[in-house]
Amino acid sequence: MTVQIRPAVLDDLALIRRLRLQRSSWLAARGSDQWSTRAAGLSIDYFARAVSRAVAAWETWIAEVDGEPAATITINDRADRELWTSAELADALIVHYLIVDFRFAGYGVGQRLLAHAAALARAHGRRWVRLDAWTANTDLHAYYRRAGFRLVRVAAPRDPSPSCALFERHVDDWLLEGGPISTPAGFPMTQLARDPIVLPVSG
Ligand SMILES: CC(C)(COP(=O)(O)OP(=O)(O)OC[C@H]1O[C@@H](n2cnc3c(N)ncnc32)[C@H](O)[C@@H]1OP(=O)(O)O)[C@@H](O)C(=O)NCCC(=O)NCCS
């Protein structure tokens, strides 16, 4: 089984939208309010607009497992206001909208995409991968802890947000595991985004 990570293009928007809807239903069936609009999660249309801007800026990626689209991630240096300090933002790349199709759950595809974020962060001279997770979803927090992240704090922005559990991992931690893929420093994001990376996946 191989995983290929490639930049998303506009034709992938329907896929990304489908993944979001699929996992929203999965979350609701588990009794979680993550991503539900009643808990102030993004509407599917707002989400789709945000992702289409990210795709246009080459910030969104697709992981294909044996050629089949299986997951997505968006990586940039922005976050909602008052989550991270400007110093924390300046030294990190931020992960958004990480979703693995549940048909491919359990193969470590999510962790491969997080390693990809670390590779991009290193290439941009940033030392941290950071993300905000749904505050109330402790099972999701446990996933990020198992992926080597630590809870920094729960933010309290003036505009209340349901996604305020702030996690981070230092890029050097991935090196200790034999990754991430090294990429030359100083490349602009768009040039990085045009280089597909092929990774083996065990299991
Ligand atoms: C998080 C995610 C990308 C990880 O993908 P992955 O690396 O392939 O890992 P898996 O899907 O096998 O998940 C690993 C474990 O975490 C759990 N988990 C993952 N996301 C979870 C969530 N949002 N809520 C509760 N549990 C979650 C899974 O149920 C699984 O538990 P198990 O080992 O007991 O079966 C994927 O599970 C997913 O798309 N989750 C829903 C969307 C999501 O929450 N994305 C993160 C937004 S910050």
Image (tube, grey):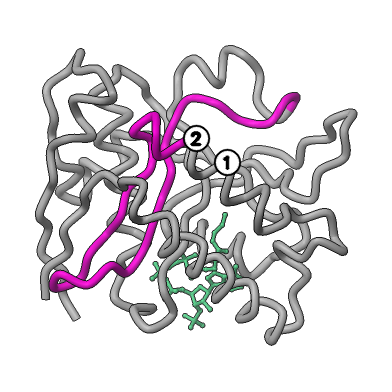
Determine whether the residue tagged by mark 2 lies in a helix, strand or loop: helix
Residue ID at (36%, 63%): 71
Determine whether the residue tagged by mark 1 lies in a helix, strand or loop: helix
Q: Nearer the viewer, residue 1 or 22?
A: 22
Instruction: Determine whether 72 is above or below 126 in the image.
Output: below
Image check: 80 left or right of 70?
A: right
Residue type indicated by callout 1: Ala
Image check: 8 left or right of 81?
A: left
* Residue stretch rendered in magenta on the structure: 53-82
Q: Which residue is mark 2?
A: 53
Q: Which residue is mark 1?
A: 50
- Residue 108 lies in the magenta-colored region: no
Residue ID at (13%, 29%): 183
Badge 2 crowding class, 10 Å Cα cut-off, few under 14, some 14 to 19, many 20 or more, is few
Badge 1 crowding class, 10 Å Cα cut-off, few under 14, some 14 to 19, many 20 or more, is few
Q: Which image quarter is the C terminus in?
A: bottom left
- Where residue 3 sits, quadrant-wise, is bottom left
Q: Position of residue 195 (x, y in %)?
A: 12, 38
